[in-house]
Image (cartoon, grey):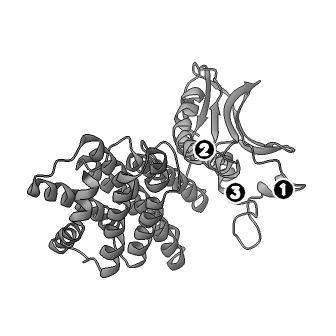
Amino acid sequence: MLHAFLSAHRADLIERCRIKVASRAGPKVIEADCSYGVPRFIDQLIETLQAQPERRDALSGWGGGSKSVTSEMGVSAARHGRELALQGFTVEQVIHDYGDLCQAITDAAFDVGEPIEVDEFRTLNRCLDNAIADSVTEWGYQNNLAYADKSSERVDRFVYQLRRLIHTATLAVVAIKAGNVGIAGATGAVLDRTLLELRNLLDSSIGDLRGLHPEVPIRCTRISVATFIAESKISAALEARHRRCTFTVLPVDPTLAVDVEEALLFAAVDELLDNALKWSPPSGTVVLSASASGDRIRIDVQDSCGGLSAGQAEKMLLSSVPDGSESAAGGLSECQRNVQANHGTLTVSNLPGSGCIFTINLPRQLFSEPVHSG
């Protein structure tokens, strides 16, 4: 049995991991790293393998990456990622720690002729998958906090975030290709979210540049509203699953079109969807829809925030406040700038006791008309 093998060879496995760490170039792991991360994971893996099925999720988390649950192993893995981040280690070190352990277990089992059953190996992979996902997520969070304290320069922050996201996505792919985890698991879900963060970062940065350089002309192209809504659905659907919200996209007339700078419109709609999912409860519903009325197109994002207090709707759409910071309602001024850059308007309607609807209103076009640049 794998749990008996792990118990009997615990010290040897930890030493094998230490040797692997020491043999790699780059920052060497300190005592807190190996003494907490790897040994604690081994103990929790042993406990998971011995536990009854109904107890395993609480110990080590769900399989498949499609559900979110706070597990004992996830809490420990997050702490491990946090400690490494605070001590200046890279996200590569976080992934390598768990990869080293997987290799150490398989090598040790081969050396002593200990067979690992298929179900046991699946449990090992699931635990590694969830631990890597929780560690990397926490590492990224801590690095964001650390960087925010050091610099507020937009360009520096963009470069930092861009490199972080590309680095994290690359290492997630490396972990998946190494065979330690599956693409359908929690690490695959982290990869999905990282790539979507990357796209959103690029979209929002284009909006920032427009605000800094309003003299730069908008380059509009004619796009299908139905196709645009379908693409916007992808990132929001992943986030909705993560937050356990219901996300609904209503059918869109395939003949509808708008002339816009697509990246700016993506940035605006992504911001509205992100806010809607953030403020809706886990049991709530967010609805994305698009329709035509006369010569206008409206894109609606409806949430389940519970409704707005008196005067809050007006404050939400303030372009700025005297000190130049975002409005008190939180970050919708950039969204409004992106909409206005596309010759549109952004409004909000209150649904007392239920939620609110943010509406982007744009000039309607037809596919038969010539595409033009503004």
Question: Above or below — where is 270 with respect to 252?
Answer: below
Q: Earlier in the sequence, mark 2 or mark 3?
A: 2
Q: Earlier in the sequence, mark 1 or mark 2?
A: 2
Residue flagged by tag 2: what amino acid is it?
Answer: Arg
**Mark 2 Cα within 10 Å, few/some/many (few <14, many 20+)?**
some
Residue highlighted by disc 1: 312
Quick one: SS at disc 2? loop
- Which residue is farthest right? 310
Residue flagged by tag 1: what amino acid is it?
Answer: Gln
Q: Earlier in the sequence, mark 3 or mark 1?
A: 1
- Front-lying residue, 195 or 103: 103
- Image quarter (top left, top right, bottom left or bottom right) of the C terminus: top right
CA gap, disc 2 and disc 3: 27 Å
- Front-lying residue, 175 or 128: 128
Horizontal side of 98 relative to 55 (left or right) equals: left
Name the residue located 69 percent from the left edge and 33 percent from the top edge. 363
Quick one: SS at disc 3? helix
Residue highlighted by disc 2: 244
Question: Above or below — where is 105 with respect to 53?
Answer: below
Name the residue located 53 percent from the left edge and 51 percent from the top edge. 69
Q: Where residue 13 sits in the image (x, y, percent)?
A: 21, 66
Q: Where residue 258 sits in the image (x, y, percent)?
A: 62, 31
Q: Which mark is residue 333?
A: 3
